[in-house]
Amino acid sequence: MDSVEIIKSQHCPYLPQDPMFEILTRVSLETLERCRLVSKEWNHVTYEPSFMKLYCKRNGILSGFFIQCLGLKLYTAFASQGNPFQDRSLSLDMLPVLAIVRAVSNQGLVYCESLRSRFHYVCKPTTGEWVKIPNPKTRFTTYRNAMVVLHSRPLHYKVVRLSEPKDASRGCTIICEIFDSEKGAWKRLENIKSSGFVLLSEAPPVFASGAFHWFTFSQQIFAFDINSEKWELIDLPENFTDETTFYLKKALVQYEGKLALLRYAMDVDKVEIWVMENYSRRTWKLAREIVNSAYEDTIVHLYRSDVAVVINYKDLVWYDLNNGTSTTTKGSHIFFSRNVYPFESDYEPMF
């Protein structure tokens, strides 16, 4: 019985703040994910910047962004706040072939596809471990990928592959396959009839409330539940796409573990963070509003609840939402890269 189960079994409604803080800063990544489900208080505390900074230091957690660019050559780098790009600190060199990142999961697992031979791998860059997994149906063209670790001990993960027929005459059809590590095989689900919507964002999906989420051209969110293996469309908040606001940018992000939307109206220089307060009821709440933000580029992620990450031509810029200050991570190989994956991993073996 782990610490989370002990607390639940004793019906302890809360722990004093200081002991709770100390305990939570010393648990594993998997246990931390489960602790966040115990209460709103625990969830909020564990997303506080001061907590995460201490947690990463005490547990040797590598936290930042895994970036891959495919230009004249394949370039892979890792970036963290306040540090320069480190192209050798996190790599795919352990793989037997040159590989493209298709998805990055929680707890630091990466799903890759070889550049030429079309082999598929799952690896953990911080430990150098990797396994080759069976190929999905290669006669389909891969459209989007996603991956999640369900348990680390024993290791259980799932990979989602959304693809489309190479024959365009088949219409708006999305083919869905899932690889389950416990079964060691791909399973094809019922085709998704898109009825005109097309997955919009090339950015990695946001995983929240047990589902992966992508924007669509129909101004909705495509959600795929990893447990039920069902999909649905979620409406954006009312007036979120205000036609009277010019040069509107938006991003799908995670805010304290919840599905959230970033809305940036450049003409009025304002950033809004909308959070899905109740996922089952699909209720949105305006959590934060920042004026005079002066962002010049596209926000791609929330690194912490108070730090937005922006990518420009060749750098990552970290904006503090509280005081408006910023720090820049310089890089020379990330021109227009959209393969920017949030990455958090320990150095414990998983395979």
Image: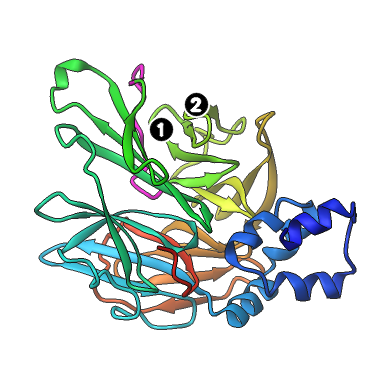
In the figure, is residue 283 to the left or right of 207? right
* Residue at mark 1: 216
Residue under the point 33% across and 21% down: 191
What residue sits 47% from the left and 30% below the top?
A: 229
The N terminus lies in which quarter of the figure? bottom right
For this rendering, which residue is in front, 18 or 331?
Answer: 18
Q: Disc 2 marks which amino acid? A: Leu
Which mark is first along the chain, 1 or 2? Answer: 1
List x then y, in percent, for residue 243: 50, 32
Of helix, strand and loop, which mostly describes the magenta segment? loop
Q: Residue at x 71, y 50 (%)?
A: 37
Observer-nearest residue: 182 or 53?
182
Q: Nearer the viewer, residue 267 or 106?
A: 106
- Give the percent coordinates (x, y) of residue 183: 38, 40
In the rendered image, the quadrant that contains the C terminus is bottom left
Q: Are marks 2 and 1 in contact (CB under 8 Å)?
A: yes
Q: Which residues are magenta?
A: 191-204
Q: Is residue 236 magenta?
A: no
